[in-house]
Image (cartoon, rainbow, N blue to C red):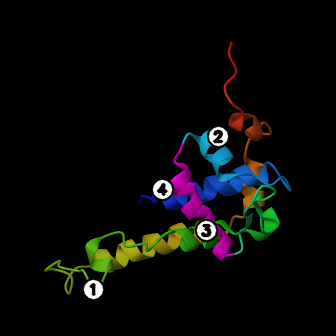
Amino acid sequence: MHLTLHADYSLRVLLYLATRRGKPTSTQEMADAYGISKHHLVRVVQTLAGQGFVDARAGRSGGVTLGREPKDINVGKVLRAAEPDFHLVECFDRERNGCPISPACGLKGVLAEAREAFLAVLDGYTLADLLERSRPDLADFFLPARAG
């Protein structure tokens, strides 16, 4: 299974914001911290804000903050909101399926079961759990590199 950048960045944004609880953060600051595109992060923040995972306020005094407590942000729900679909193979997409063996193939059911197991594991974790499993110095990894 491979997550889209949108889903990956969604989790990264939440981890970043969780290390700066209550401090509004710009998308540019997060993009710089991760070395990724601000353009991508703007869309990610829009997705997360639409689901209530973050609060995003425009303007000079604006920024992005967590919209809920970390214990109330479920990792499985975040990924479901951020992934456009979980079509592991062509036959998962009824409209675009061109696989000639689909009606007789047993693979689709096995892959669907594996996908559900994957999501079930993620449903068992919250952002608070991810923070607890992270090193205590996680926030230090977001600091700009210092000249030695």
Q: Amino acid at mark 2?
A: Ala
Mark positioned earlier in the residue sequence (1 or 4):
4
Which residue, given by chain and number where applicable, does mark 2 sit on?
A: 33
- Judged left or right of residue 142, residue 100 is left
Q: Quadrant of residue 88?
A: bottom left
Q: Closer to the camera: disc 1 or disc 3? A: 3
State the separation of the CA atoms marked 4 and 3.
Answer: 14 Å
Q: Which residue is mark 4?
A: 5
| Earlier-in-chain disc, 3 versus 2 | 2
Q: Is residue 117 above or below residue 17?
A: below
Magenta segment boundaries in residue numbering: 36-51
Q: Main secondary structure of the magenta part?
A: helix
Q: Position of residue 4 (x, y in %)?
A: 45, 60
Q: CA distance from mark 1 to mark 3?
A: 27 Å
Name the one closer to the observer, 55 or 73.
Answer: 55
Q: Amino acid at mark 3?
A: Gln
